[in-house]
Amino acid sequence: MNFFTKYKKIFLIIGFVIISVAWGYILYILFFKTADITPTEKSKDDSEFISNLPNAADGSGNIIPDKSDIAKPSFTTTPIKEQEPDRVARGKETEITKLNDSPSIGITIDKYGSKIQYYNQDDKKFYTVDKKGNIKKLSDKVFHDVEKIIWSPAKDKAILEYPDGSNIVYNFETDKQVTLPKHWENFSFSANGDKLVMKSIGLGNENKWLAITNDDGSKSKKIEPIGVNADKVIPSWSPNNQSIAMYIEGKDFNRQEVYFVGLNGENFKSTIIEGRGFEPLWAPNGDRLLYSVYSTDNNLKPKLWIVDAQGESIGNRRTDLNMETWAHKCTFSGSHSLYCAVPESLEEGAGVFPELSEHTNDRLYKIDTNTGIKKLIAIPDGEYNISKLIISDGEREAFFTDAKTQTIHKIRLK
């Protein structure tokens, strides 16, 4: 008894140490010791192990990823390959084929609807590209520094405009060239290509006229005096030969009125358009007119409309197509089938300042102009700003010029 009493404090200290060690070991087993990993839980390569711990959540309920929950890369694992673009347009990312490497302008399709014709700005010559991508000269003649090209409907000849104001008509089938007066501008071919309408801008307002001429520059004829309103006149020969130009008169900031000018002083009906920046495109039959305008109702972005533009029907069926793009980025394929390059997004004011759209990328849509039904045709597999769009006969291919590089490309539609 005396022995226990004598060494009581020592026994208490030893007991406390033993109990503390025991509790420490129990806590270690429960909370800190890593479980053994069997061959089914761990591969031979430690880097491939993925923890099964759930993610933690912060006070707001948002999930915070645990880094241990992310697989480490393995040098032996083959990366997953991204999905290839479709070779034929099906409304998704679509393969684009580049047809040439030189900056080009004046892209059009030949009278058979199969070959592309264009002007090469590097060597100053005209070329064709067939369905197989073969490039051939359309002419051996060199045309220095052509600025603008207006093709005839038959695509056998074109008006070539130069920076100094010079204009020529060149026939690629006969290799004949005709020089037109420098004070003639804003040309448009007649439906069969044998005549031209243009603005004759002489010295003084009294010498400014809307006029027509034969395609060789002969038998020119004054149609209407345009004087101080010359900048409001758009020469545009309709496919049905009903009118040769349009006169645009402002009504208010968001509205304009379009008057159609005939060859013989006809008193056609006019139509109201809902916006400014009027840009027209005739339907193939000349019975309807597609146009783009901008207004404050659409944050000054371009928007497509279509309206009847023939005889007593002028102004009827005016329809908002609800597409934010310009008419020059569209093309008809048949009477009611319209293809348009539509920017993925446009900044406010792009209609007033088109340069705001220079770096946008376009998608290809098809629109039924009778029903207004729209369909996404293709998302190009790259960054393309389409400045000129053409559809081949049978709607088998779409050809376009990229505004960023001025090179020509193709999309397979069928």
Image: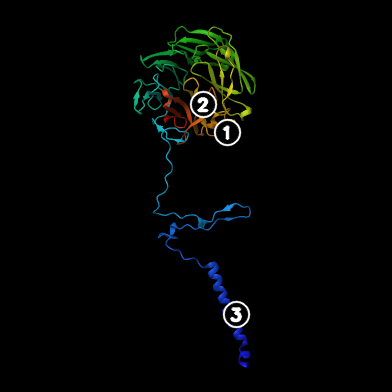
Location of residue 103 by image quarter: top left
Kindly identify which residue carries mark 2.
367
10 Å crowding of disc 2: few (<14), some (14-19), many (20+)? many
Relative placement, left or right, of 139 versus 370 is left
> Which label's residue is closer to the chain start, 1 or 3?
3
The percent coordinates of residue 301 (x first, y second) are 58, 29
> Which label's residue is closer to the chain start, 3 or 2?
3
The Cα atoms of the two marked residues, 1 and 3, are separated by 77 Å
The percent coordinates of residue 189 (x first, y second) are 47, 14
Relative placement, left or right, of 44 versus 283 is left
Tell me the tag on residue 347. 1
Residue at position x 39%, y 19% from top? Answer: 112
Tell me the tag on residue 16. 3
> 91 or 118: nearer the eye?
91
The Cα atoms of the two marked residues, 1 and 2, are separated by 23 Å
Relative placement, left or right, of 376 versus 6 is left
Q: Are marks 1 and 3 in contact (CB under 8 Å)?
A: no
Location of residue 192 by image quarter: top left
> 67 or 40: nearer the eye?
40
In the picture, the quarter occupied by the C terminus is: top left
Q: Residue furthest bottom?
A: 2
Query: What amino acid type should be assigned to the residue bearing mark 3?
Result: Phe
Tell me the tag on residue 175. none
The image shows residue 89, relative to residue 226, as above or below, that is: below
Q: Helix, strand, or loop for circle 3?
A: helix
Query: What amino acid type should be assigned to the residue bearing mark 1?
Result: Glu
In the picture, the quarter occupied by the N terminus is: bottom right
Q: Helix, strand, or loop for circle 2?
A: strand
